[in-house]
Image (cartoon, helix red, strand yellow):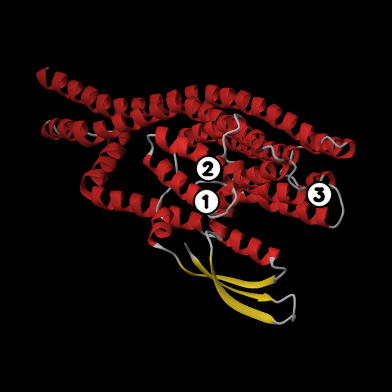
Amino acid sequence: MPLYRYTALSPATGKKVTDTLTMANEQMVMDYLYFKGMTSIELKLLEKNAFQKAMEMISGIKENVLLLFLRQMSVVIKAGIPIYKALDLIILQTEDKRLKTVCQAVKNDIGEGSSLSNSFRGYPNIFSDFLVSMIAVGESKGELEYSLMQVVEFLEASRELKNKIISAAIYPVILIGAGILIMIAMVTFVLPRFMEIFVSYNVKLPMPTVVLITVSNIILHYYAYIIMSVISFVVAIYFIDKTPWGRFGFDWLKLHIIIFGPITHNVAISRFVRTLGVLHRGGVPLIRALELSAGAADNTVVAKEVKKVIESVKDGKGIAAPLGESKIFPSLMVQMLGIGEESGSLDVMALEMADYYDQETDYKIKRQMAMMEPAALVIIAVGVGFISASFLLPMFGMATSLRQGAQ
């Protein structure tokens, strides 16, 4: 168990008290201090045991495994089986070693008095804030199985949308990739052999051939530098994306890039309103629901605009006006959420908007990919045509020279 050092105000004397406490996670320490009537001032993790360190190395659980786990938990708990026993059953039947490890850790935490949500909170790389908040609400209302199923439905909808995008993009990407590889192979391996023939017959090379030969020489003589440059560029992009300003810049680009920008924008809006609807329906306070929804959008540009809405709500205002002031959120969504807020059906309107933007995203995916396929074919045709001209024009010149020589 991790060891924490806390500084808190004593309810008896009002003075600062500093002590250490062994608990499963920070939330359990905070709960302990709350029940003791102590006001926390500072909390610091002193050490972790070997198991806790090992758990931090787990990168996560596959999405389909997590979905199955949550669905099983919902069914077993609905059948009246205690959580402790439910985890035992899942540990016995699952084949995923990482899930077994996580379930055993959660079971140990519950055995020491932790709630399911508090135990999940100790593994943020596996259980998101959204998931933990929904489970906490379900526990407080005695509807844990219902909250688990809501989470499952949300994650399945997100996975289905992601799969649609991937499926639609596979063919154009493969088409362009194959075309590029073929052109590189022709320039790198085929053109040098033809060059030997052209040089031996002293053929005057046209401009397309000269350009292609120059590209071929660059690839052949500087391929190591080219590879290193590409790797350096990818690594630089990776680290820039880890910085707040870099991530913001890339997220802005994702929303405005040609072809993919409208799709990315719709996906971010759909995730935001669906998360807001699910959390609000589950009973999560509006401000907390907005905070989690901002993260669910997976776009810092959208999240920045949502933070302005949160400040407006904290000042006692509604969400429609600040949403309408932003250029990120569509006017239809703003109006519908405003109606939902006034009528007390914000969750219903949010989920309807999420379904609407999912359908819009599906339509835009089909339309944009339908445009991308012929565009990819045109690009490949132009490339192949240029390479063919680079080969054929010198051959025509060589044939003309041979015919004149024969005469």
- Residue 391 x/y as whole percent: 25, 27
Mark 2–mark 1 Cα distance, whole angstroms, equals 7 Å
Q: Secondary structure at mark 2?
A: helix
Q: Earlier in the sequence, mark 3 or mark 1?
A: 1
Looking at this view, is 339 or 118 the one in front? Answer: 118
Q: In the rendering, at what x and y percent does residue 282 appear?
A: 72, 39
* Mark 3 residue element: helix
Q: Residue at position x 53%, y 25% from top? A: 369
* Identity of the residue drawn at 17% across and 30% down: 194
The three-letter code of the residue at mark 2 reads: Tyr
Q: Tell which circle, 2 or 3, labels the residue nearer the N-terminal end.
A: 2
Residue highlighted by disc 1: 111
Q: Which mark is residue 84?
A: 2
Q: Residues within 10 Å of mark 1 (few under 14, many from 20)?
A: few
Are the residues flagged by discs 2 and 1 in contact, CB closer than 8 Å? yes
Query: In screen coordinates, is 324 left or right of 9?
Result: right
Image location of residue 340, percent across then percent down: 84, 35
User: Is the residue marked by circle 2 packed among few (<14), some (14-19), or many (20+) residues within 10 Å?
Assistant: some
